[in-house]
Image (cartoon, grey):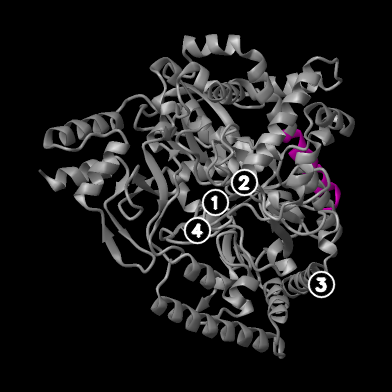
Amino acid sequence: MSNEQLEMLAAEAGLSVDWKDANAKPQRVSPEVLRKVLAGLGHSADTDEQIAASLKQLQDQSLSTTPPPLLTVDHGSNLDLSAWFKPKTPFVLELEDGSRLDAKLTAKAELPALATVGYQQLAIDGQHLTIAVAPKTAYTLGSATGVSVPRTWGLTLQLYYLRREGDGGFGDTQALETFARAAGERGAEAIAISPVHAMFSNDSERFSPYSPSSRLFLNALYAAPGAILGERAVHMAIDETGLADELTRLEALPLIDWPAAAAAKWKLYRALYAAFVASSHPLHEDFNSFRHAGGQALENHCRFEALRDESETLGIGGNWHEWPEPFKDPRSQVIDEFAAAHGKQIGFHAFAQWLVARGLERAQTAARGSGMSIGLIGDLAVGADGAGSQAWSRQDELLSALTVGAPPDILNRSGQSWGISAFSPTGLKRNGFRAFIEMLRANFAHAGGLRIDHVMGLQRLWVVPLGSPANEGAYLNFPLDDMLRLLCLESWRHKAVVLGEDLGTVPEGLHEKLSTRGILGMRVLLFEQDNAQFKPIIKWSDDALATTSTHDLPTLSGWLSELDIDWNKTLGHIDADTERQWREGRERERRGLRAALRQSYGEDAISDSDVIDGSVRYLGHTRAPLVLLPIEDALGIEEQANFPGTIDSHPNWRRRLSGDCARLLDNANAARRLEILAAARQQAAERDQ
């Protein structure tokens, strides 16, 4: 069997046979792994005959004389159309503002740079396609703040952390609204929150915010119905359902009981919906408008949820991949018949989406009203569950036979398999990037910024065949320039900044490409060191945000106390020698951080609290345009939100903060550290003007 032909097929399919790991060591994907990954992409490669047939099919597609339905170009640049049209071909370009341009392609068969920024419609030689004309950069922090050299700050927060009386056991949009006002009053310009993507409503055992059912819609559990429908309606529904004692019990728990809390909240929602549809509520018009604006995408999501609700009755199971063929197709007659018979159930799921969307809208309005120039920064997960709503609705545009992850790197030495699916590069192009654009619009809708988890995924993703270990994968390449242009275009249309989480194995040149596009990278204090020598303040990047830690890393307090090492030991992830090496290395790093603080400020940080205070000041004085302080480090909390590589052995995504959301920042540690950060940011701004 010819490995050369196999590698040609892999390259044509967008896979990288050769790559470099986090230590810049060359790696090569084995033929066995290539065949599995290619099969996951839909290209059979078990025999020479299959390889030849798959290769011919891909090559024929690349030679097509029909252009894709959407092409991207930077504003002010010509667009090469020579692959499909002859020089001097006449065309008509209809702009978004309704104006019309009649002209001809250039002598090189290029579309001249006549169009303004936006989605323009090109009619040429009997064909119609969309031209996405993108601004050179995303909406920048300077544009958001009105300052040429911004030195702003904000907080990061897991939304479910927050507490308020009547929340039902986890944080919601009303708590976020209250917290946003408190943070804005203290000078914060932004609050970066955990993902709020839609989960599986009838499977509350799955609650990791980074493994959603859909990145198009929202986790309805975060809705605060009293803020939308009124507290009286909620109290009546609680009385009707007899939930009062259960809700009180759930609110008192130190950790979130997601299955019980979700069950209670869905029961409450159903009672609220029944009362809503039976009344002449003044918000009916707003709800109907919301459903209309959501279009077929919202309808499909709600149908999917209803199908899963009825899966036992229908005898179809919970995983749509195993459904009978008519149920697999969202456009089938069987699905239409199901929708006609279950209209109220589908309407209920739309109602839940409406509640949470309006709640997020209120939270962003509160953030901006408190003086924040940015407000909420949403978090876009790197993918969605292959068995979820988005994968069912957009089957031609998502890969559901491969899971996304990461090769072994500095963050995880065994590699990672995240159990989520990614976009199909060819499916995106074939469908005019529809799924990507609608996802961006959904996530920009109620935010002043967007953090893109694992932003390297815009260029390439480590994909692993289902059932294979994380190190048996390959990099799948994506149309980076097209996706960056669309990202910049949607960023400007929504006046929202873009942050890219670029930690781990980063392709060469990506940092620079993101910087050129005005997309801030991410620098973490715990990583900004070389053998315990921490980077001096003045050496920090001015094209990346700065932060002390992330949800996947120990908090500063946990790092100083070695709690993360303790957890690894307790869970059996490390042997005695590794534990000893980690603890010795941590001691060197602690000394290194203290030395950096002493060198910067001329005084010793004696206690751990002093070190955290000093680290906050240290970051505040860097050249980073934006410093985001995790609420855990503001408060001095030891435990981290998520412990990678664990599911049930660590309480991932279940922790709550002590104290009411309205008074959380009155905590002595938080109040002091926010003052330190605000003062340091002001000093950095004065220094760098």
Q: Marks 3 and 1: CB-CB under 8 Å?
A: no
Q: Is label 1 in a helix, a strand or a loop?
A: loop
Q: CA distance from mark 3 to mark 1?
A: 30 Å
The three-letter code of the residue at mark 1 reads Asp
**Which residue is denoted by mark 1 in the rendering?**
453
**Which residue is denoted by mark 3 in the rendering?**
672
The three-letter code of the residue at mark 4 reads Pro
The tag earlier along the polypeptide, 2 or 4, is 2
Determine whether 129 is above or below 471 in the image: above
Q: In which quadrant of the rendered image does the C terminus lie? A: bottom right
Q: Is label 4 in a helix, a strand or a loop?
A: loop
Span highlighted in magenta in the image: 356-371
**Which residue is denoted by mark 2 in the rendering?**
195
**Which residue is denoted by mark 4 in the rendering?**
644
Kindly report which numbered mark, 2 or 4, lies closer to the viewer in this rendering.
4
Q: Marks 4 and 1: CB-CB under 8 Å?
A: no
Question: Residue 607 versus residue 287: which sits nearer the camera?
Answer: 607
Question: Residue 506 versus residue 242: which sits nearer the camera?
Answer: 242
The tag earlier along the polypeptide, 3 or 4, is 4
Q: Marks 2 and 1: CB-CB under 8 Å?
A: yes
User: x, y percentage for residue 471?
Assistant: 33, 55
The tag earlier along the polypeptide, 4 or 1, is 1
Q: Residue at x 40, y 43 (%)?
A: 403
Q: CA distance from mark 2 to mark 1?
A: 10 Å
Q: CA distance from mark 3 to mark 2?
A: 28 Å
